[in-house]
Structure formats: structure tokens, C-alpha cells
Amino acid sequence: MSLLNVLIEKIVTAISSENDGKCVPLSQVAPESVDFITIARELMKRREIMIYYDIMEDEYYICKRDNKCRRLTVQDIVDEMRERFDSEPVPKPIILDFIRERAPSKYEAIYNMLLNDGVLEEVNISGMIFVRIVK
């Protein structure tokens, strides 16, 4: 059995024995010297394990598939913004505060990513910057 397979089995056993139902960062159960992408690909092949990548935290998370571990994603933030603000221009500070409430440590990066991806559009109205959510 290869070293990778031994490591995968160890991770699966550790997660399967978790009883509190929380997701665990992959960096807590795997040594830093291994390639997390390779481990994540191998873990995705297991039916009993769920793995996902959290963009805001730049971290892979794993948990038992039957657990309802749910983390906030950028798509969740976008969906909530579309529901709350529709497509009307909103003052930029309100949008920044909205994102900051959901992702305090990465709100500027998320705002810039959404702006660059065309999800948000800045509009200058009488010298004030407003943000419109593009549908």
C-alpha cells in the first residue's frame, strides 16, 4: 500500500469517528508536507466523505457525507445580495458593509472579485459611487 493510500485511510477513519458533526480543515488531519490537491482528489472518490474548498478561507474541509456541514460561500453572498438589493444602484459603503458582515476578514477581496467577474458594477451618479448587482 502506498503512503498516499495509508494517509487517505487515516483521514477517512479520523473523520468517520467524529461524532460532533463538524467539518474539519484538511490541514488539521494531513501533514503540511503533502499536496492537499492530490489528497482532496483521492478523498472525493470516497462516498462516505464530503470535501469542499472554501474560497474565503483558502482551505479544504472534510466531513462525513451524512453530516449537514455548511459553510458560507461567495455564491451564498451573491444570492443574498440579489435578493435583498435587486438590481437598483446601492451606495458602495452599504454593499461593502453587507459583505463585511458575512466575511469580515476577506470582504475587500470578495468585493473586488465580484467586481472583476462582472457580478457587481460601479456606477458614478453625481460624484457618488453606487453599486449595481448584475443579473
Image (tube, helix red, strand yellow):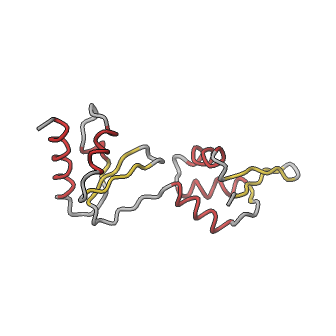
Coordinates of residue 29 in the picture (x, y in percent): 24, 45
Q: Is residue 40 left or right of residue 122?
A: left
Q: Quadrant of residue 86?
A: bottom right
Q: Residue furthest bottom?
A: 83
Q: Please, which residue is most extreme toward the left here?
A: 1
Residue 37: x %, y % from top left: 34, 39
Q: Considering depth in this image, is 107 or 53 the residue closer to the camera?
A: 53
Q: Quadrant of the N terminus?
A: top left
Is 58 placed above or below 62 here?
Answer: above
**What residue is at 73 percent from the left and 54 percent from the top?**
131
Residue extending farthest to the right is: 126
Residue nearer the viewer, 4 or 83: 4
Which quarter of the figure is the C terminus placed in? bottom right
Image side of residue 6 versus residue 72, left or right? left
As drawn, is 42 to the left or to the right of 90? left
Q: Residue at x 64, y 68 (%)?
A: 84
Query: x%, y% of residue 10?
Result: 16, 46
Specify the quadrant of the image occupied by residue 90.
bottom right
Percent across and percent down for residue 36 are: 32, 39
Label tally: 0
Residue at 20% over, 45% down: 8
Q: Nearer the viewer, residue 108 or 123?
A: 123
